Amino acid sequence: MELIILVVFILGYLSITLEHTLKVDKLIPAVAMMAILWAIVSLAHLPVFEINTELKELEKSYVDGVLVHHLGKTAEILIFLIGAMTIVEIIDYFNGFYVFKNLIKTNSKSGLLWIFGFLAFFLSAIIDNLTATIVLVTILQKIVSDRSFRLWMAGMIVVAANAGGAWSPIGDVTTTMLWIANKVTVSGLIINVVIPSVLCMVAPFIIATFLPVFKGKIKGDGEDQFKSHSKGLAILIIGLASIVFVPIFKIVTHLPPYIGMMLSLAIVATCGEIFSRRHISLSKPSEDHLAHETSSPLHYSLTRIELPSILFFLGILMAVAALESLGMLYHFADDLNGAIPNSDIVVGLLGILSAIIDNVPLVAAGIGMFGYPMDDQFWHLMAYSAGTGGSILIIGSAAGVVAMGMEKINFFWYLRKIGWLAFLGFLAGFFAFIFMRDVVL
């Protein structure tokens, strides 16, 4: 039965990667794979990890309880994502990102590459790599009209955002997991991982600077299609500040990040309603060109979020949760550790594997498998590898999935154009970490 489950997962994954070849939206195989995997678990009465011992009295209820457990964890990410996307769309409603178009004076392609790279690196450490990618890709869409160049920029933003999130306890869900599980401290993580993360971002950016696509100047033919708004700067500051507020809210209240994101959304939406000076309409906004002028900022923004990406993310996370619940990921990691005694190689392979299988269950498996003490270098290397390895494939990280949805990036295009750069960056940071640990520190 485990073989059937693996076959279903592999076929579903291949269908996602061949989206443009099969002419089938990636969310369809993702949600289908999720449903089929859990149906097999239920119909075959497969044993799953214990969530609540009381549920074991009724097998169906037990499986339902495991599903609810994983759905709750997945929903936290999805609600956080919806909130972040909506805030970004509200900012865009007032053309808030037009401010960046005025601030960025350079029209050099290589100059834009480095500006967006450093913005992604540092923003992701503060507002997490997912939200940073959403914000910067949205800004990019307001600055660059050439889609072919924009695809390259979006791909490099993913690389920089994942690198930036790896050295911050709130920059990536995996580093947050290690932090909450008392495997790393804030100071220990930053001190040991920040330099490898910088190299992971800088190395591919240096190489990219010499590529033909980043030579020359960008065209300014898209300038006239954007209009400034009197409240644009104000809503931009409020919106970005509200996102920065989310990790502070989590640290103070110890509540999940999506709670803080919902509070931030309420604040930004309220400011948007005040700035728009329109009555709040509870009816669905019209879909014609007058929708922007007649609907509330919140309602209009909710119609523009990437719902297909949300459903795709739901399918992927819940499908991987099925493998996790059956213990298949844990057994694989255990076998890998037994076959390869060198822990550095194991963590490196897990980092590369995170580009294929979601890094969250891989890190969860690692937390349960290994008994290293807090702030052991093993955990720091795992934080780096899991956070940056996902950049190798477009669907290997939440940032990549969002960028894929926002810019309709082809899986194989990213693999050919960006994947090798991300891999070189991953290796640069990985070997820098080992050198620092064994020679410098």
Image (tube, grey):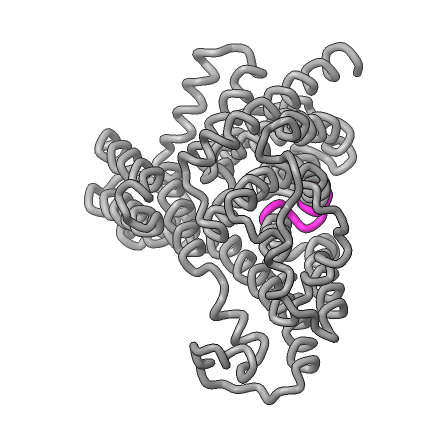
In the shown orientation, is residue 195 left or right of residue 423?
right
Query: 133 or 214: nearer the eye?
Result: 214
Query: 122 or 245: nearer the eye?
Result: 122
Residue 223: image quadrant is bottom right
Query: 176 or 304: nearer the eye?
Result: 304
Helix, strand or loop: magenta stretch = helix
In the shown orientation, is residue 24 left or right of residue 127?
left
Where is residue 423 shown, x and y percent of the image? 55, 25
Where is residue 73 shown, x and y percent of the image? 49, 51
In magenta segment, residue 336: no
- Residue appearing at x 44%, y 18% in the figure: 336
- What span is colored magenta in the figure? 121-130
Task: Specify whether residue 168 is in view.
Answer: no
Where is residue 116 shown, x and y percent of the image? 68, 44
- Residue appearing at x 62%, y 58% in the figure: 142
Task: Specify whether residue 34 is in view.
Answer: yes
